[in-house]
Image (tube, rainbow, N blue to C red):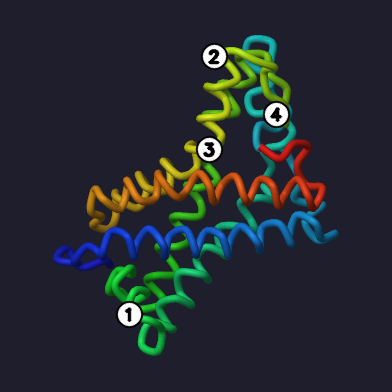
Amino acid sequence: MIPSALPAPDPLACAVVLIAAMSLAGFAHTVWLRSRYCVPFRVPIDGGCQWRGARIFGDHKTFAGFIAIVPAAGAAFAVFGVMRASAPAWLDAGLWQLPPEQLFGLGCWAGFWFMAGELPNSFLKRRMGITPGSLPRAGAQRLLCLALDRLDSVLALLLALAMVVPMQWMTWLWVLALGPAMHLAFSALLFVSGVKARAA
């Protein structure tokens, strides 16, 4: 159980910790998706079901991603918790004062909602007739999709964490300023490794 009087971490340090943890989880996610062991889990979350003539989420949203990134994010949070005593001061300042096992649970929670945050975006794209892995060629729809692709997971992660631990509003600003760049780099990594059809 998380203490009710838990202090909020330093905003910038917390943003750096969150981005570092999710980047590590993203790397593990990429390695997992490239392995043969994830193949049985590449089952679409929507089960192939349609709503109003279009898929709910599409083939790209599978259980394989959740299976990798949730425990990987938990492990990253927990490792940072173990390292805090001997790591630079900013790491301790950016973490909630919780034992590693609770940080593991917090990281799993963050990883789950980081992945789940993409689902409303996918649902919206299917309603717009946009096929998985593609973007509109130009116009407002393209700009909207690009913005959602950069912010959906980050916003979901921040909302999920704010539900269970204290966070300063400046942490949101730092993560929203730095997080999309991390998300873009992660997408580029997936593209280079052949997991995604486009880099952005």
SS at badge 1 = helix
x then y, percent, for residue 93: 29, 72
Which amino acid type is marked by label 1? Answer: Ala
Q: Residues within 10 Å of mark 2 (few under 14, many from 20)?
A: few
Q: Compare marks 1 and 3 and give the one earlier in the sequence.
A: 1
SS at badge 3 = helix
Question: For mark 2, what is the residue?
Answer: 140
Q: Compare marks 2 and 3 and give the one earlier in the sequence.
A: 2
Q: CA distance from mark 3 to mark 4?
A: 19 Å
Q: CA distance from mark 1 to mark 2?
A: 44 Å
Which amino acid type is marked by label 2? Answer: Ala
Query: Quick check: marks 2 and 4 in contact, CB under 8 Å?
Result: no
Quadrant of image for the C terminus: top right
Question: For mark 4, what is the residue?
Answer: 58
Q: Residue at x 69, y 10 (%)?
A: 53
x then y, percent, for residue 167: 25, 55
Q: CA distance from mark 2 to mark 3?
A: 16 Å
Question: For mark 3, what is the residue?
Answer: 150
Q: CA distance from mark 4 to mark 1?
A: 44 Å
Going by the picture, which residue comes out furthest to the right? Answer: 36
Of the two numbered discs 4 and 1 in the rendering, the one whose residue sits closer to the viewer = 1
Which amino acid type is marked by label 3? Answer: Arg
Query: Quick check: marks 1 and 2 in contact, CB under 8 Å?
Result: no
Q: Nearer the viewer, residue 183 or 60?
A: 183
